[in-house]
Amino acid sequence: MQAHPNTVDPSEVAKFEAMAAEWWDPNGKFKPLHMLNPCRLDYITQQIAGEFDRDLTQANPFKELRILDIGCGGGLLSEPMARLGATVVGADAAGGNLPVAQLHAEQSGLEIDYRHTTAEDLAAAGEQFDVVLNMEVVEHVADPLAYLTATQQLLRPGGLEICSTINRNPKSYAVAIVGAEVIMKWLPKGTHEWSKFITPDELAELLTQAGLDVVDRKGFVFNPILWSWSISDRDLSVNYVTASVKS
């Protein structure tokens, strides 16, 4: 299997390691993710259930599915996947996140294989998964195409990749950087670099070049009046998510 150069950006890793202890604090530095998480999980579970013909009303609907949560952080997505019966590997280039994730999983009575590693190293080792969760990572790597190619290699034929990121336009600058980092102070200044944001068409092209077929895309929309997130078929102006399959 062809190996790819490491796409990890050390400065990006350092940002998240500095916040590691706060992963499970719903009012801490990861408050935006805690608020978004139910919306993300709804999309993820529906896409997996549809692709693999699973009934979400049954116990352990994701049993026998092997899922990789790349850039797993403190395990906010790894844990729900494990509760649904999947075999979960949580991988993160920021090693400081993993003790937090491991401790929380143990306290929750969950078995999750957390690893301090990268997509490229997992691909080089020949690891294979039914599903790759690639959420809010691609805007932090040094080479998006090389990174997405590695995630594609990690999928079995017929496998599903869920990839979310942030659009690049004036509105996303106002919302994701000025709003979240400066006004609301939800995130430390400098967490995101607007120039690294990726438009939906750019991401679709990158995923296609990486060998994936994009089958769905939706927007995650924040309503400041209701103070809640929802999934939109049309509004991809800031946060959005894609589903792709490996044919």
Image: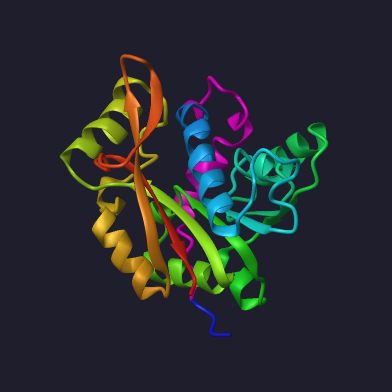
**Magenta-colored stretch includes residue 229:** no
Residue 71 in sight from this viewpoint: no
Determine whether 216 is above or below 81 in the image. Answer: below
Q: Quadrant of residue 207?
A: bottom left
Total numbered circles? 0
Q: Residue at x 62, y 57 (%)?
A: 68
Does residue 12 appear to the left or right of 113 in the view shown? left
Residue 150 in sight from this viewpoint: yes
Q: Residue at x 33, y 67 (%)?
A: 206
**Magenta-colored stretch includes residue 19:** yes
Determine whether 228 is above or below 206 in the image. Answer: above
Determine whether 146 is above or below 78 in the image. Answer: below
Q: State the extent of the magenta-drawn residues as a range.
A: 5-31
Residue 162 or 6: which is nearer the viewer? Answer: 162
**Residue with the most extreme left position:** 170
- Give residue 128's position: percent from left, percent from top: 65, 70
**Residue with the most extreme bottom position:** 1
- Give residue 210's position: percent from left, percent from top: 40, 73
Residue 243 or 88: which is nearer the viewer? Answer: 243
- Give residue 65's position: percent from left, percent from top: 69, 58
Q: Residue at x 35, y 71 (%)?
A: 208
- Give residue 200's position: percent from left, percent from top: 28, 54
Q: Name the quarter where the N terminus is drawn.
A: bottom right
Q: Quadrant of residue 227?
A: top left
Does residue 12 appear to the left or right of 203 in the view shown? right
Residue 140 or 245: which is nearer the viewer? Answer: 245
Q: Residue at x 23, y 48 (%)?
A: 168
**Residue with the most extreme top position:** 225
